[in-house]
Amino acid sequence: MTEKASFSLLHPLRVRWAECDAQGIVFNVNYFLYFDVAMTEWLRALGLQGDKTMDFFTVHAEADYKGSARFDEMLEIGARCARLGRTSMTIEAAIFRGNEVLTTGKLIYVHAEPKTQEKTPLPEDFITRVMSFEKNAPEITASGRAS
């Protein structure tokens, strides 16, 4: 079960009208937009705001819908690193209305050199920042790092 207290980052977000369908319910694809907001805020919390020396590319995204958010509701979007590999990481995300879990997600990002977009190992400084930030240490894979 996804618990709100397990997230080191919880970012507040109010549902905007443009994100809703005709019934005032958040259209399903917008939950991925919310996950992206959480990822940006998670990187900012790591001290990487505006950092152009690191690029991450999404290679996998999934979501499980458990409830619906509606126009003008206040939500909290959680993000946490669940796994660090050699060149990739897995982020778990969740969207909460109060303590109710509305959506959970899993996103896999590959680290790449910004100009060539060639995948590269996660920098040691980045791994150190993640390990210091997260409440629950991420799984480390592939010889101490992700692949």
Image: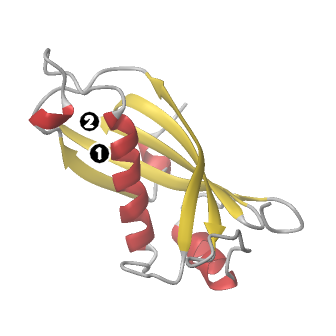
Check disc 2: other Cα within 10 Å, few if <14, some if 14-19, many if 20+. Answer: few
- Picture quadrant of residue 96: top left
Name the residue nearer the viewer: 58 or 8. Answer: 58
Judge whether 102 appears above or below 138 on screen. above
Mark 1 and mark 2 lie on one chain; the one further toward the N terminus is: 1
Mark 1: amino acid: Glu
Q: Is residue 80 left or right of residue 72?
A: right
Element type at mark 2 = loop
Q: Quadrant of the C terminus?
A: bottom right
Q: Residue at x 13, y 17 (%)?
A: 22
Q: Position of residue 143 (x, y in %)?
A: 89, 67
Q: Is residue 137 left or right of residue 18?
A: right
Q: Quadrant of the N terminus?
A: top right
Q: Position of residue 135 (x, y in %)?
A: 54, 61
Whole-angstrom CA distance, mark 1 to mark 2, is: 8 Å
Residue 98: which numbered mark, if any?
2
Q: Position of residue 93 (x, y in %)?
A: 47, 44
Judge whether 94 appears above or below 103 on screen. below
Name the residue nearer the viewer: 96 or 3. Answer: 96
Element type at mark 1 = strand
